[in-house]
Amino acid sequence: MVCGRADLILSGHDHTQQILEPTARSRGTRQIVCGTTGKSGDGKTHGTQPARWQDFSRDGFMVLTASAKSLTIDAYTVDTATSAPPLAHTFTTTSALTGAR
């Protein structure tokens, strides 16, 4: 229902971290999934959605920085033994900000 009507969907239910690429099936809507602060997944990809980056086995979090000209998503994993949050992936886009649908 939302795909094709929104530039970006943010969700946090799944126990993974994913930056999913827009496809014909998603009608151009990019999907960001970040739900790993509670538990990690099984380490396996489920489904065939192309991903710019994903992590299914480590705890972590994402930080979204938005401006009038760009969106940046920084994905961090967390070493549970030390609580250190190393930066795992950075993605910046301007394509979702080029105009209303």
Image (tube, rainbow, N blue to C red):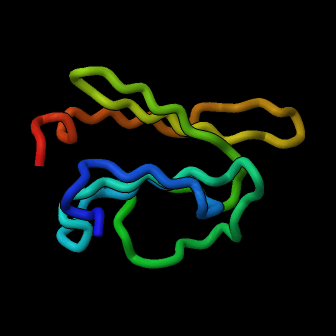
> Position of 90 compared to 4: left or right?
right
Between 66 and 81, the one nearer to me in the picture: 66
Residue 67 location (% of width, % of height):
31, 21
Identify the residue shown where x is 87% and y is 33%: 82
Q: Please determine whether, in this image, residue 32 is positioned above or below residue 64.
A: below
Residue 45 location (% of width, % of height):
54, 72
Q: Which part of the image, by quadrant, shows the N terminus?
A: bottom left
Identify the residue shown where x is 70% and y is 70%: 42
Residue 13 location (% of width, % of height):
60, 61
Residue 36 location (% of width, % of height):
67, 52
Q: Quadrant of residue 35?
A: bottom right
> Position of 61 compared to 54: left or right?
right
> Position of 32 compared to 67: left or right?
right
Q: Quadrant of residue 4?
A: bottom left
Between 97 and 17, the one nearer to me in the picture: 97
Residue at the extreme bottom of the image, as rendered: 47
Residue at the extreme right of the image, as rendered: 81
Q: Quadrant of residue 44?
A: bottom right
- Can residue 38 be seen in this snapshot? yes
Identify the residue shown where x is 33% and y is 31%: 71
Residue at the extreme front of the image, as rendered: 1
Identify the residue shown where x is 42% and y is 26%: 65
Figure disc tally: 0
Q: Please determine whether, in this image, residue 72 is positioned above or below residue 21.
A: above
- Can residue 53 be seen in this snapshot? no
